[in-house]
Amino acid sequence: MIIADKTALQGTARDANGPGWESLRLLVRSDGMGFSMTETRVLPGATLRLEYKHHVEACYCIAGAGQVVETATGAVHEIRAGVLYAPNAHDAHEVRVPEGGDPLLLICVFSPALEGDEVHGPDGSYPAPRD
């Protein structure tokens, strides 16, 4: 059985961050579950341009508010606690959190699993799984 205590993971290689975001990787590839799970905070004022070319993800909001914008269509979706979004077709998208608001707190699942130390590349994607 895997028990992950976020306080024990903070400050380790599983505690990743970049401009406008922080992500604690609760489950990673080496855990052998076939998917990874993160607790991710998108910070106020951030606009993240993302396109996961090698992974699919599902993000469930547990606190805060923001928007997800579908790059291809311009469709804007309001995200708040209790809302899930999943760019299931490797959709390019933006995650926006208004300046002065609360961080958007998301529980995210990625498949295939993340190694745990990934950060977004210039194209908004994580690298392909290592193998």
Image: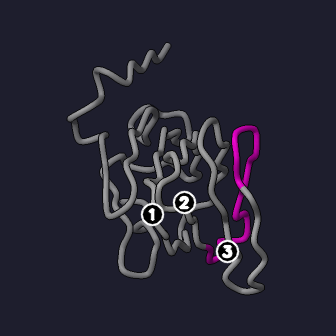
Q: Nearer the viewer, residue 52 or 44?
A: 44
Q: Position of residue 16 (x, y in %)?
A: 31, 48
What segment carries the magenta color? 79-93
Element type at mark 1: loop
Kindly report the secondary structure that dominates the magenta region of the rendered protein: loop
Query: Residue 98's quadrant in the figure?
Result: bottom right
Q: Around disc 1, counting alpha carbons within 10 Å, would you say few (fewer than 14), some (14 to 19), or many (20 or more)?
A: some
Element type at mark 3: loop
- Spatial separation of the CA atoms under disc 3 and disc 1: 22 Å
Q: Residue at x 34, y 61 (%)?
A: 119
Q: Around disc 2, counting alpha carbons within 10 Å, would you say few (fewer than 14), some (14 to 19), or many (20 or more)?
A: many
- Residue bearing mark 2: 97
Q: Nearer the viewer, residue 100 or 45?
A: 100
Kind of residue at disc 2: Val
Q: Nearer the viewer, mark 3 or mark 1?
A: 1
- Residue bearing mark 3: 91
Q: Nearer the viewer, residue 111 or 6?
A: 6
- Spatial separation of the CA atoms under disc 3 and disc 2: 19 Å
Disc 2, disc 1: CB below 8 Å? yes
In magenta stretch: residue 80: yes
- Residue bearing mark 1: 45
Q: Earlier in the sequence, mark 3 or mark 1?
A: 1
